[in-house]
Image (cartoon, rainbow, N blue to C red):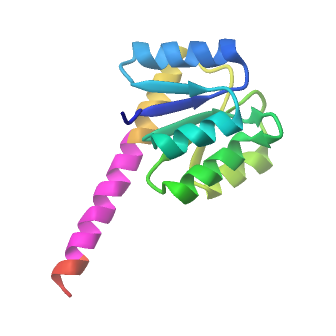
Amino acid sequence: MLHEVLVVDSRPAVLYSIVEALQSAGYSTAGATTFEEAGGRLKAHPPRLLLTGIRLGAFNGLHLVIRARFDHPNTASIILSDAADAVLEAEAGRHGATWLVRPVGQRALASAVARVLGAADQARLALGGFAEAASSHA
């Protein structure tokens, strides 16, 4: 089964609240509390969206985004942080991730997820159209 959104947060209560909010908004979700668990889920069931907290023990959410983008380039990403960090936010952007600072309400989170997934779908369609056009001229 392909999960639409993989939610990763080292705090189980936070993870549960995000999963519940996204399920209430109609998304299929899976959750993980560690970098290693998330890596296994990414490998077994690549999601359309990776939504991760920045703090994940020895690793961080940016490491997970980089791994996901390397293995599954079409996986969109959102990183949730408890504080603004211009350096990490810029680095996240370089890897195609959207950076959000908590607290984020349920509606705002669902809206961000919809926006990021919509942008990813548009990019995929544009690249598909480009590939089709390139192959028809070959």
Q: How far from the left and from the top, in percent, is residue 30?
A: 50, 26
Q: Main secondary structure of the magenta part?
A: helix
Residue 99 falls inside the magenta stretch: no
Task: State whether residue 79 appears in this view.
Answer: no
- Residue at 28% x, 70% y is 130
Q: How far from the left and from the top, in percent, is residue 118?
A: 37, 41
Residue most extreme to the right: 58
Q: Nearer the viewer, residue 68 or 80?
A: 68
Residue 99 lies in quadrant: top right
Q: Which residues are magenta?
A: 118-133
- Left or right of 6: which side holds 137? left
- Residue at 58% x, 47% y is 97
Task: State whether residue 86 appears in this view.
Answer: yes
Q: Nearer the viewer, residue 19 or 119?
A: 19
Q: Nearer the viewer, residue 94 or 39?
A: 39
Q: How far from the left and from the top, in percent, is residue 108?
A: 51, 22
